[in-house]
Image: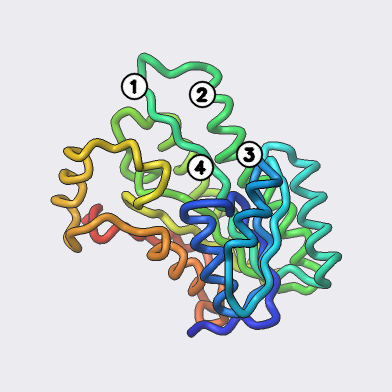
Amino acid sequence: MTDLDGRVALVTGGTRGIGLATVRALAEAGATVVLTGRDEAKAKEAAASVSGSGSVSGLALDVTDAKAVSTVVRGVAKEHGRLDIVVANAGIMEDALLGMIREELVDTTLSTNVAGTIHTVQAAARAMMRKRSGAIVLLASIVGEYGSAGQTVYSASKAAVANIALSAAKELGRSGIRVNAVAPGVIETALTAGLSAEAVAENVGKTPLGRLGTPEDVAKAIRFLVSDEASFITGQILGIDGGLTL
């Protein structure tokens, strides 16, 4: 198993789905993990549900608030004496046909998925530059590259996230900081729970591996990307889609 003993990790949006699975994967590998969510009670409850060789704690954080993100990241680094891993998972998805997109949906999605990711990468980079090392993983999506009917705003936001990873990797590499992104396909989470049986069957039918993905599938890939086993990997967008985009 990947050894993350002694590493300190921060996972935004870590109260459920891919975020919580990632927290579990990192803790199982020995990392000390701080997870965040908008609701402090839910964040602490999620943290308490995780077992592993590494300790886990939960904090409240709204990633759209740049000052709050900076404060939390600085606080984690100060409390633990270091910050080695940041997974910028916080994000939202709301479908809407092009003619039905509300201004509020555009503002909320871009402020959370795009601005929130930028705030997180900025704060993480500042903390990691002190030791000139660190690994950052962002959550993109296959729809950010291929698009999806009814998901114009979400697709645009995830395309932006992928390019944040590419640009940050070029900028931060000389400081010893690696930046990558994962691009999940259709994953069984609360975000996809509303899919109809027909939509699920259609996606499974198009997927060479013949199933939907799980949060654990994504979490294991993230665990690899933040580990020393991936020490020469940066600026990559790793598709985790069972071959759906082939």
Residue 174 visible (yes or no): no
Query: What residue is rendered at 51% in x and 82% in y?
Result: 2
Q: How far apart are marks 4 and 3 (CA)?
A: 10 Å
Q: Which mark is residue 160?
A: 4
- Relative placement, left or right, of 237 versus 128 is left
Give the residue type at disc 3.
Ala
Which quadrant does the C terminus fall into? bottom left
Q: In which quarter of the image is residue 50?
A: bottom right
How crowded pointer 1 is (Cα within 10 Å; few <14, some 14-19, many 20+) is rated as few
Q: Residue 115 carries which label?
A: 3
Q: Nearer the viewer, mark 4 or mark 2?
A: 2
Give the residue type at disc 4.
Ala
Q: Distance between the residues labelled 2 and 1?
A: 12 Å
* The one of 143 and 29 positioned closer to us in this rendering: 29
At numbered mark 4, what does the secondary structure look like: helix, strand or loop? helix
Residue to which mark 2 is pinned: 105
At numbered mark 2, what does the secondary structure look like: helix, strand or loop? helix
Q: Which of marks 4 and 1 is in front?
A: 1
Give the residue type at disc 1.
Leu
Residue furthest to the right: 78
- Relative placement, left or right, of 103 versus 43 is left
